[in-house]
Image (spheres, grey):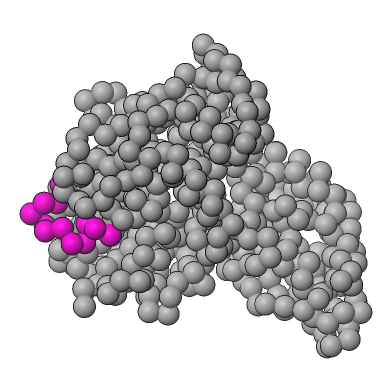
Amino acid sequence: MSQILLTGASGYVGGRLLRALEQSVYAVRCLARRPEFLRSHIASTTEVVPGDVLDRASLDRALQGIDTAYYLVHSMGSRGSFETQDRLAAQNFAEAATAAGVRRIIYLGGLGDDAQSLSPHLRSRQEVGRILRASGIPVLEFRASIVIGSGSLSFELIRSLVERLPVMTTPRWVSMPAQPIAIDDLIAYLIAALDLPITEYRIYEIGGADQVSYADIMKAYARHRGMRIRMIPVPVLTPFISSLWLGLITPLYARIGRKLIESIVHSTVVRDDSALRTFPIRPIGMDAALQKALANEDHDFAMTRWSDALSSSGNVRSWGGVRFGARLVDSRTMSVNAPPSDAFRPIRRIGGTTGWYAWNVLWHIRGFLDLLVGGVGMRRGRPHPEELRVGDTVDFWRVEAYEPDCRVRFAAEMKLPGRAWLEFEVTGDESSSVIRQTAIFDPIGLLGLLYWYGIYPLHLMVFKGMLKNIAAEATNR
């Protein structure tokens, strides 16, 4: 049986592709920086190995015995020079794949006329393809534009703008032509590549049936939702200003928003129809893609969202060598006349549309401040209002550990001078339970200590109120 390596399995496209591969005859291995976040999202037949494309040595084991490798990683969410990181990652992967005897690579890049001056993001995506091809391994590179599907970055951007701004000022980038592709069609292409002879591996431009602009997509979304929107064009609105605006209105934060807009200002349409002549796939149009995305919004929450990817929070920071101060802990308990399952129920629902049970306005202010310094803010929400899994995002937290009706630990992904966790534990019997709430902080230097003690009065007020209201909700059947 041929074995496939999938990189980017925690991302939006990679997660959807993983579901499709798990239903095929192929043996699947996933490369993950944090394997523990991925294991609750995979089938029992899928293997997960730790590794990072930025760490050359970690790739050897992952690529051992691999026939086909999917390369679906990028550094768009990172700080600093993401082009440098993309270049290094591609070089590492190409070298390791060559050494392991990988037979072919399937890569997803971005549409854009490379004869023109492209944005840094599009330029980097195409450079990655060239680096992979330079290895001598046959590479099939798909180049796609906007991806439309429930949970995709572009779909969430469009939905937030239309739902929250019935009247909006629109910069020039909303009128640039694109060729959006439905997520199911994109996955179909990625799967079909496995059956294509290696002699036909080259660059294929793929897109949906329609060439439209972001403005067209927003109008179509509003029509499907029975809404009306008005757009007022403005002559000048820089990517930086637009990105800050998107950070306030949409789930994006400024750094990703700026890179996205820099790419949108270029036309991203299919100029070579070779894909239609090579593959038995006939992509649907924009309206059908939007209808499908809207219909699937409340589908099984195991399907991926762009914000669930580790890259959605920026660089995964390495804490090796960092000297932390003494660990600071704030812990309190409260007894309730309810069994553990009832006591844990409000904890399981925390965040997202439910909120944080006390002083939600302060939580949103903290999220806004996080956005201002380049963090994720509170825009990511959570995948499902009732269920949690390890690796899920919950506003600016991520589920790090989870035991149903017993324990959950959230790791902070907001910008902090240290590491932070929020943990809930429930113990008891059929008649009563004890809820323990614990906030943990590892400060870095004096700044970390000043941060903890400076906001401690607010923490005291918020966390006490939160535990009190969780206890009250637990007995409110």
**Residue at figure coordinates x 45%, y 34% from the top left:** 259
**Residue at figure coordinates x 63%, y 67% from the top left:** 388
Apparent side of residue 69 relative to residue 82 in the rendered image (left or right):
left
Residue 198: in magenta span: yes
- Image coordinates for residue 302, horizontal then vertical, percent: 52, 65
Main SS of residues in magenta: helix
- Image coordinates for residue 187, horizontal then vertical, percent: 34, 55
Q: Is residue 166 above or below residue 337?
A: above
**Residue at figure coordinates x 30%, y 71% from the top left:** 24
Extreme-top residue of the structure: 235
- Image coordinates for residue 255, horizontal then vertical, percent: 52, 36
Q: Is residue 388 above or below residue 381?
A: below
Q: Magenta residues, as a range?
A: 191-203
Apparent side of residue 231 relative to residue 44 in the rendered image (left or right):
right
Visible residue check, residue 278: yes
Apparent side of residue 214 relative to residue 456 in the rendered image (left or right):
left
Q: Is residue 300 above or below residue 246?
A: below
Apparent side of residue 351 relative to residue 69 in the rendered image (left or right):
right
**Residue at figure coordinates x 78%, y 66% from the top left:** 346
* Position of the N terminus by quadrant: bottom left
70 vs 208, nearest the viewer: 208
294 vs 243, nearest the viewer: 294
Residue 423: in magenta span: no
State the image quarter where residue 213 is shown.
Answer: top left
Q: How many marks?
A: 0
274 vs 379, nearest the viewer: 274
- Image coordinates for residue 233, horizontal then vertical, percent: 54, 15
* Position of the C terminus by quadrant: bottom right
Extreme-left residue of the structure: 199
Visible residue check, residue 109: no
